[in-house]
Amino acid sequence: MLTIVYFAWVREGVGRDDERIDRPSPDMTVADLVAALAARGGGYAQALGDSTKLRAALDQRFVPLEAVIGEARELALFPPVTGG
């Protein structure tokens, strides 16, 4: 299983804090999974449809969207973070 955790407006768009899905293929990238989730339509499409507005972390480590999910147990999706 892979736990996907959503933060900020991504969470608001999909309408949930997190979800568990069957583990994707080990060579699937974060971008591939985001596209598959966006294809669900509705809030998923709205929140995840433009991947340039997303950042990701696998097992609490920042990764580019092109990163392979591999054996990660958690994927976090969130908007870019700005300092202040």
Image: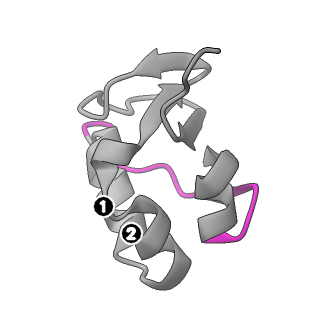
Is 76 or 82 nearer to us in this picture? Answer: 82
Question: Element type at marker 2?
Answer: helix
Query: Which residue is at 31% across, 50% downward?
Result: 51
* Separation of marks 1 and 2 at Cα, in angstroms: 5 Å
- Residue 48 at x, y percent in the picture: 42, 60
Which quadrant would residue 84 be assigned to in this image? top right
Query: Which residue is at 68% across, 64% downward?
Result: 12
- Residue 13 at x, y percent in the picture: 60, 68
Which label belongs to residue 35? Answer: 1
Q: Are marks 1 and 2 in contact (CB under 8 Å)?
A: yes
Q: Which residue is mark 2?
A: 38
- Residue 40 at x, y percent in the picture: 43, 79
Is residue 10 in the magenta section? Answer: no
Question: Element type at marker 1?
Answer: helix
Q: Amino acid at mark 1?
A: Ala
Magenta region, mostly helix, strand or loop?
loop
Q: Answer above or below: position of 46 versus 10.
A: below
- Residue 69 at x, y percent in the picture: 38, 33
Q: Which residues are magenta?
A: 14-27
